[in-house]
Image: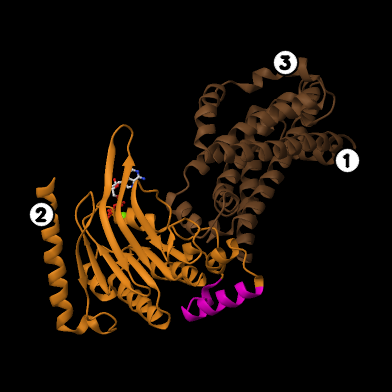
Amino acid sequence: MIKIDNLAVEYKHFNSRLLALEGVNLEAEKGETCAIIGPSGCGKTTLLFVLAGLTPFQQGNVIINEEPVRAKRKKTALILQDFGLLPWKNVWDNTALGLKIRGSRPDILEKRVRNILQHLELYKFKDYFPGQLSGGMRQRVAIARALTLRPDLLLMDEPFSALDAITREELQSLLLTIWHERPMTIMMVTHSIEEAVYLGQRILIFSPVPGTIVSDIKNPYFGDPRLRERPEFYTLCHKVRTLLEEGKSNGKKRN
Amino acid sequence: MEKSGINKAVQLFLAFIFLLLFWAGLSFLLNRPVLPPPWLAIQTFVEMFQSHLLPHLLQSTFRVLVSLFIALFLGSLSGLFIGRWSRVDSFTSPLIYLTYPIPKIALLPVLMGILGIGETSKIFLISLIVYYQILVTTRDAARDINKQIICSMVSLGGSEWDLIKHVFVPSALPKIFTSLRISLGTAMAVLFLTETFATTRGIGFFILDASMRGRYQEVFAGILAMSLLGLVLFIIIDILEKKVCPWQHI
Ligand SMILES: Nc1ncnc2c1ncn2[C@@H]1O[C@H](COP(=O)(O)OP(=O)(O)OP(=O)(O)O)[C@@H](O)[C@H]1O
Ligand SMILES: [Mg+2]
């Protein structure tokens, strides 16, 4: 599904350059969920934007479903931490936006948006503006909008980090349910080790900038909605934390 | 909704009464014909409305409305364009910066020389002054659009036109309304001034003419008419804003 070969991304600052990603190699299967975790500023968002076709790269190859990555790939959906919703559109119009932009037939759009809003328990709020919703509901609308596109690749940048702990766990479970109903490839950047372990079939740990993948952990416990109650959960969290620390100190040596 | 509307009307009415009392008190203290008491002014206003004031008022309304529409249309269009494309911005911003402080009202005699003393020079001047306000507001609104919003739009498959329609215009709208409100006051002031030059129609002329003949009750009837025009426009802008930008009132 995803194949990244020796990817490097460089940003030009006014008169200097910054190497954000270097030597990133990654293969992910169809329907696999990958949690991406790493120190702040190491290039995680950059990687997502490359996969979304929004950031150009200087070196390497990025293939999605046998095709070179591009911005207007129809089955890629992107969910950002904030601001993904338009404050001037109500829940219905925000959800329908993607389909509308892609010129869907009105009857298909109606039906799909209604189904998804009902499924995510948002239908009652369809006339509300984002400013009238809680943070959790807003992010649910963003998820709803992404799902209307029937994506096979879902890119998420710290989608739940602005939420309180309880809402965050609710939405993590919701995402897991959605994935069980209709498996899609998910690449999710997170700052939370618990989230990575709960939602990642694989956990990719990044080094400090220039970011590269220093560990790729298979998560045998993935998929259990009650994973948080099992002791293995904490063992794995501990392992990830240790690897993160190691990645950081190795990064320091490298620089 | 209903209730707050009624409340607002009551508050406005009370404020109106208060202003009248203030005016009456001032007129009583001053005790000179130059400041007649409000009831005389209102009486004159009512008596002269149909026969004298209305034609002047219509002329003024026409001028200010046409100017506002022109300024609104051109100002938001060019503001959007400049704010969206930084290359245009880097060329035009210094221009705007340099010309913004020019007191455009001082151009009136020149404009009359070029465009003639008819409607064109008046409308041009009012439009020009309001245009600047709208232009700068819209440009800044377009510049300030959050990058994340643009990214999500592009990843949804949005074209440049989608961005303008779904992002740039709606995000600028509330700000355009605000600047319209602010520049309405300026527009009315400029309207008055242009109407004191080389014309025999318009509320500005009516007021000037009455004052030269020492008819102060008529002066105040004219001022009342002009204020009424401003108030009505203000209310229209308010109502439009509530209709067009409902997310601002939640
Ligand atoms: N548009 C840009 N122009 C220039 N430099 C950028 C740009 N975007 C990111 N960078 C730089 O690239 C590096 C990686 O940024 P990125 O946003 O990908 O990090 P991140 O891992 O997502 O960080 P965080 O965890 O804090 O969100 C940072 O040093 C950042 O300053
Ligand atoms: Mg980031």
- Mark drawn on residue A249: 2
Colour of chain A in the rendered structure image: orange
Q: Is residue A164 visible?
A: yes
Q: Which residues are magenta?
A: A107-126
Residue underneath mark 1 = B50
Q: Are marks 3 and 1 in contact (CB under 8 Å)?
A: no
Q: Does A21 appear in magenta? A: no
Q: From this viewpoint, is residue B227 visible?
A: no
Q: Residue furthest right?
A: B51
Could you tell me which residue is drawn at 33 percent across and 56 percent down? A47
For numbered disc 2, what is the local secondary structure?
helix
Please determine if labels 2 and 3 lie on a single subunit: no
Front label number (2 vs 1)? 2
**Ligand 1: does it lie within 8 Å of the C-beta at label 2?**
no
The three-letter amino acid code for the residue at tag 1 is: Gln
Say whether residue B10 is left or right of residue A6. right
Q: What tint does the image give chain B?
A: brown
Classify mark 1: residues with Cα within 10 Å, few (<14), some (14-19) or many (20+).
Answer: few
C-alpha span from label 2 to label 1: 86 Å
Q: CA distance from mark 3 to mark 1?
A: 32 Å
Check the residue under mark 1 and report the chain it is in.
B
Q: Position of residue A30 (x, y in %)?
A: 38, 73
Residue beneath label 3, please? B109
Q: In the rendered structure, the residue with mark 3 lies on which chain?
A: B
Q: Secondary structure at mark 3?
A: helix
Q: For residue A136, which numbered disc appears in the image? A: none
Q: Position of residue A142 (x, y in %)?
A: 45, 67
Identify the amino acid type marked 3: Pro
Q: Nearer the viewer, residue B48 or B163?
A: B163
